[in-house]
Image: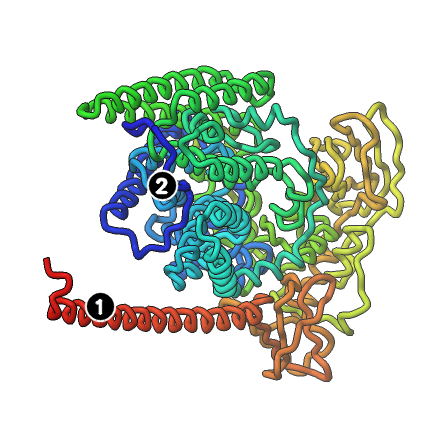
Amino acid sequence: MPPVVQTAPDRDALAPSASPPAPAEPQRGRLRAAAGASGLTCVVLCLAGLLAGTYPFGPTTRNIVDLGQQYLPYHAYWRKLLLGEADGDLFLNWSSGFGSNFLGDVGTYLSSPFDLIVVLFPADRIELALYVVTVAKITAAGAAMAYLLLTLRRGPWPVAAVLGAAYALSGWTFNYGATVPMWLDGLLAFPLLCLVGEWARAGRRPVLGPLVVALAWIANFYTAYMATIGAAVVLLVRLVTADDDRRRLAGLLRAARSVLIGLGLAAPLVTVVFFATRVADPTPPTAFEAVPWSEVFARLLPATASVATPALYIGTAALALALTLPFNRAVPPRGRAVWSAAVVLVALSLQWEPTHLIWHAGASPNGIPYRQTFVLSGLLLLAAWLSTAQGTPRLPALLGGAAVLAVLVLAARDSADIDRWTFPALGAAAGLAVLAAGCAFLASRHTASRVLPLLAVGLLVAAQAGEAAVTGARIERQQLSKVSWAPRLGPWHEDVARSVGRVDTWPNRRTDPGETPGGNDVLVVGGQGADYYSSLTSKVYSETLSALGFGYYAKGRHPVSLDNPVTDAIFSIGARTRSTPTAPLRQDALPEAAVTTVERAVPPLVTVRPGPAAGVRYGDSAFANQELLLGAPVYDMPAEPRRTPAGPGAVTLTGSCPAGSEVWLWAPEFTGSAALDGRPPVDFAGKAPSVRGPMQPLGTVPASGAVRIALHARHGGGPALPRQPVGCLVEDRLDRAVRELTATGATGVRVTGHTLTARLPAGSTGTAVVAAPRIPGWRCATDGAEPAPAARHLGLIAVPLGAGASSVSCVFRPPGLRLGGAAGATALLAMTAVALLDRRGRGSSGRGSSGRRQVFTARATRARSAGIGDG
């Protein structure tokens, strides 16, 4: 706590300063606060991990939900790409999704400058690299907030450092940001954008302001959008509480100019993400439902975790200081009223659907509905600083804040989010905060004492840091017990990577690494598989694979590999790795697995089909759809297998197939087991709409040709089955189809980054089909002609060959790149013009000041010579 007690109101706490650049001493204080906040944040983060026993401070995995299935594999692939070891380039990712728009994924997951840190780590330490990236973002956010606090108002830098760390170590950070690292850029963006607003008000840094805006939106446009709204709220409050009415409009216009130019500079990446979002597989619409206010208040308390409620924890001491602002008469009434109203209105906006939609750009998100909470946390920290910067609030204000805090705790006492550590941590932090306030009060009475101020700050640090460390540790442990997780990278991944490396001959054929512990692991172990998990998974890719019998997670945005010889032939997967764990997976052990690799003859990546590509559509049978895309009948399918009830949740399917054929069951929404007569059961785990199960083999048809399949639903009720759930694959038919497609297909395929070239047998007619999804951005041509938008054949890239062709070439350019480039160039010109005008204005101002000084000097000289003003 600061060593003085506020005694009288001073000027408006938020009055603007249009003065020249700050002197060196305040700047040193801001830098000290920033350094102190980053150091404290880093120490507490590491301590929380140590207490939780999670990697890298313990053996337990941190790879929960998307951290393990998206961000970790994406960063592994990002490292490969930056070091020139990837199959694709910045535009196109050939490794997952059979060819996906990688620039869109970069703009969504990897465009933060912090993500470049991964190149400093070896490939087998990518988990450590991602942890360092996460810590770096969080500590930078703490430093930026501390710097902002001292920019808004002068005060003791140690207190600013503690409050900056409190912002970075909020419940939002522990509960959301630490496991969704891309959102952490928004945590940093909020204080930085508030600084841009301050520069705009003062008419300073007209070039740096737009650059900061651009960097924030490039790093993560999604949370930067929320941070921009929050910074706009802060700017409006600053303008409303300013003394100079004439400068309000000018400051607002300068801020708007910075934002517009910054958005233009970020447009080359943001527009690519926008266009990719428009064609992404849509998730089911989500209706927002506000949670009870008792649950909201509970999230202000330590050691609470939930993805359904807003993570508002900032620390008991910081929260208590924020709550003193409405009662603190040392702050001018207008500042108290406007800031308190801003905090309350933003809190209410979290709970009202129209404003909820505004915060989330018009679409209620799946999963975590309160993603904008970090903005409210930041506003609370600003309120805490403004009530404390000029000294410890007086006793009435402290009692008022304590009373409000007690009411909030009482209202939240029965919340389901309360952890067994919540109230002990709360009590300990509150006790230390009271002692800190007492020491600060005594220090104000004994101004010669040097020990009391240090003790006050030390107690405040202990209260914030200790409570935050316990909160972080408890949240990590709760998350691991409540949500899905993936094991740490280990021997399983290493063995699969070695196996893939031995047989990978891309682009002659694909190598699919199969299913490994986490999603998107193809980006870790190599190969060119179907597995792909992204917010930008295209609708055409998801629908195409679903029609062919592939499974998916995440409501369609995570298609997974299908180990089926027909689809392997369709997608030119000539080598496939199969691996199974040698023991049950554990959170605190590295996984090991038995790994095998199988190879088979498949057609090339580019095949030739007779006739035009248009006019063909998928039906309601995955088996028939596979045959349609392959171009040959390879299944024997019982038209309507008999379904006989066999007890609660049990059904027996009977039919007949050629002896020796392989029985496949397609039951995408079935949860339970299926067993071919005399064979072990096979598990199915469909759960509409979030999970769709892949088709699976059940065994070989006996010599009698009789097929009898027993299905047992896991939760009772009749199993949900499609019209044609059974198909019997005849291997000879498939081999014949592969030979025919190989004979007429490409004689050579060359892939470089985002281009593909294939040599065809001379005079080929019909349609060339590339075994890659026809996502927007592909342009193709034959025999060196001008490229045109590629056609589509059942979801894949198609190129009409006309009267005959001997080669096909295709190039991919992410949609929106040209438009974004034009916007970026325009913004760059605008920023250059602003810089030139600012320099000219400063030059004119300088000449005017010099002239005025010369006139004043001449007048003074004349006065002295006339005997006026002597003495």
- Find residue 856 and name its label: 1
The answer to whether any part of residue 102 appears in the image is yes
Amino acid type, mark 2:
Ala
For the rendered model, the colour scheme is: rainbow
Measuring from the top left, give residue 447's x and y in whole percent.
21, 25
Task: Name the side, left or right, on which 487 lies relative to 443.
Answer: right
Q: Secondary structure at mark 2?
A: helix
Mark 2 vs mark 1, foreground winner is 1
**Quarter holding the C terminus?**
bottom left
Residue 456 sits in quarter: top left
Instruction: Indicate the position of residue 237 as horizontal and vertical percent values.
Output: 50, 45
Residue 388: image tag: none
Q: Residue drawn 58% across and 57% down?
A: 574
Residue 130 appears anywhere in the view: no
On the image, which quarter does residue 799 sit in?
A: bottom right
Residue at the limit of the structure toward the front, as seen here? 867
Residue at image mark 2: 146
State how many labels appear: 2
Quadrant containing the N terminus is: top left
Residue 736 coordinates in the image, percent (x, y): 71, 62
Residue sitting nearer the eye, 590 or 263: 263
- Which residue is at the front of the view, 427 or 85? 427
